[in-house]
Image: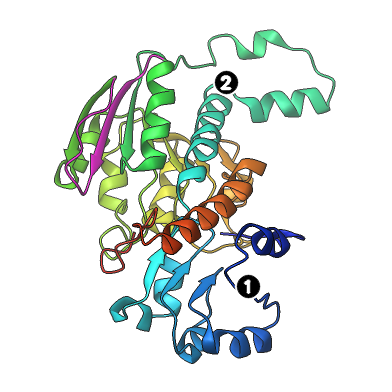
Amino acid sequence: MGEKPVPGFVEELRREFPQVEFREAATPADKLREIQDADVYYGWIPRDVFLAAKKLQWVQIPGTGIDHVLSTVPELVDSDVVLVNSRGPHANPIADHVMGMVVALSHQFRRLSEDQKAHRWDGAAYFERFLELSGGTMGIVALGDIGSAVARRAVGFGMRVLAVDKKPVRPPQGVEAVWPVEKLDDMLRQSDWVVVTAPYTKETKALLDRRRIGLMKSGAFLIAVSRGDIVDEAPLVDALKSGRLRGAGLDVTAVEPLPDSSPLWDMENVIISPHVSAYTPGTFSGRREIFKENLRRALANRPFLYVCDKKAGF
Ligand code: OXD
């Protein structure tokens, strides 16, 4: 969800859109002042700023998940203000991160890295310890832009790919089936790898609860890259501790930063990354390009890219 200040972006916008007036608002006071007569807001809009707006027509957030902005600015949902996200450029890097975790877990990169630190060359310790991905089944929870990018990669690795999605989706090339969410239990029973890419909404809150984690195949892995609250962490920890689940890759956790007291930090079969899976230069520049494209579209009265369904929450 992070965004870093980009020196020169406002000047770039001014050069490219001389007919538009841009105001940079860095501090909370600047934002409250400048929003009064602004038509557009680019960034993570705070509630008091949204409420102070008089003419606001659209807000573009420089990220994918809209759960945070909808929960902190509930008035946005029923307003006429259009909410746009910047999801496109996130999909490929997040999918790369997923496959990185999959390979790192199946080939024990954490343990290899410990050996490297200790200058230990012990090939025999790894006899028959790695897992082949080809022939395994990956089940993807939500086949949106990110889920589809993961699916393409998993198909390339020779995996059987299943998915569930809230909307009817025609299975992309190589994907065996895209089921409605009602068939999630079946998908969990069949998957060696479960990858959570769904947005966080009322319906996905703790979707992977104790019962569903209990349905996962013995020896399966779980990867989560969208929102931590979709997975109930206590049963996940239990399943990982008992060895029923073989491992997990978590770029997102229920509480972020993951509290120091969480047992997940010290589990050898868990890889944690601090909600950074999308952080390539292309993601950051891509977000800004989408904003520019939407400005062009607004000026030409054409439909925006990546309009969100505020009621559905994604
Ligand atoms: C997002 C994120 O953009 O999780 O939603 O980073």
Q: Give the residue at x 30% y 37%.
A: 216
x and y percentages locating residue 257 in the rendered image: 61, 61
The amino acid type found where label 2 is placed reads His
Residue pointed to by mark 2: 107
* Quadrant of the drawing holding the N terminus: bottom right
The amino acid type found where label 1 is placed reads Phe
Kindly state the secondary structure of the residue where label 1 is placed.
loop
x and y percentages locating residue 312 in the rendered image: 26, 63
Within-10-Å neighbours for mark 2: few <14, some 14–19, many 20+: some
* Mark 1 vs mark 2, CA separation in Å: 50 Å
Q: Extreme front residue here?
A: 19
**Magenta region: which residues?**
158-173
Within-10-Å neighbours for mark 1: few <14, some 14–19, many 20+: some
Compared to 221, does 116 lie above or below?
A: above
Tell whether position 155 is magenta: no
Compared to 178, does 66 lie above or below?
A: below
Residue pointed to by mark 1: 22
x and y percentages locating residue 91 in the rendered image: 47, 40
